[in-house]
Image (cartoon, rainbow, N blue to C red):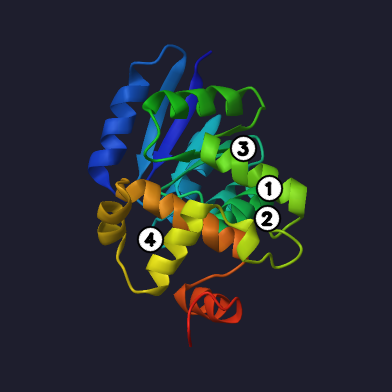
Amino acid sequence: MPTTVILAGDHRVLREALAAVLAEQSGIEVVGTAAHGAQAVTMVQELHPNVAVLDIGMPKLDGIEAAKAIRRHHPATRVVVLSMHAEPDRIRQALQVGVTGYVLKDAATAELVDAIRAAAGGNAYFSPAVAREVALMFQWGKSGRPPLRPGWDCLTPREREVLLAVVDGKTNVEMAAMFSLSVRTLEDHREHIMRKLRVRNLAELIRFAIRAKVVKP
């Protein structure tokens, strides 16, 4: 028997492209596609698929809420979510509602196939960046952050340079040129800095820099 799957996402082109790729996989059958979370929940109720693949950012009912409803009312259906970023808060929410897989959209399609096969077998699958966040959550508790606010010394030399440039108002594009790095790498540095310092936005980052006396108020 093939693993039956429904796909849900508000971007029609992406939804259809994924459906076409999965249709070529041995042992996987796409039995339906949905344009939003509420439709996905209804489709699971009607079709009883083995796996529901849900985009986190859907209208009417986002992927987290749709996953929550599916796991509550149709526990036999495993849920794999798709997301643009490995955001700790979203990962934690997904785990709390019982998702089995969390795959980043920029990952190779093979990752989604692996996640579906793992979910169908009752196993979890996370993209590498997500798996790192999950490991931090287990290491540091629910917040996924260190228990104490670290200081300037916890940052690498490159992270210190990036922090100073961010506080100085430089954009990711400008910093990429300054440090000869890709914009994606700069975004990763910013994410690591904010996680290490337990700050949530630029204002908190600036306050940290002032308290650490690495910039003048």
Q: Which is in the foreground here, disc 2 or disc 4?
A: 2
* Amino acid bearing label 1: Leu
Q: Does residue 171 sit above or below 156 in this rendering? A: below
- Measured as percent of width and height from the top left, residue 189 is found at 46, 53
Q: Is residue 199 visible?
A: yes
Q: What is the CA distance from the residue labelled 4 to the residue labelled 3?
A: 22 Å
* Amino acid bearing label 4: Pro
- Measured as percent of width and height from the top left, residue 172 is found at 31, 59
Q: Does residue 60 sit above or below 110 in this rendering? A: below
Residue at mark 1: 136
Q: Is residue 61 visible?
A: no
* Amino acid bearing label 3: Thr
Q: Which is in the foreground here, disc 2 or disc 3?
A: 2
SS of the residue under disc 4:
loop
Which residue is painted at 33% across and 73% down in the image? 169
Which residue is painted at 23% across and 41% down in the image? 13
SS of the residue under disc 1:
helix
Q: Does residue 147 sit above or below 140 in this rendering? A: below
Q: Is residue 112 left or right of residue 11?
A: right
Residue at mark 4: 59
Q: Earlier in the sequence, mark 2 or mark 4?
A: 4
* Amino acid bearing label 2: Gly
Q: Which is in the foreground here, disc 1 or disc 3?
A: 1
SS of the residue under disc 3:
loop
Residue 100 numbered mark, or none: 3
Residue at mark 2: 144
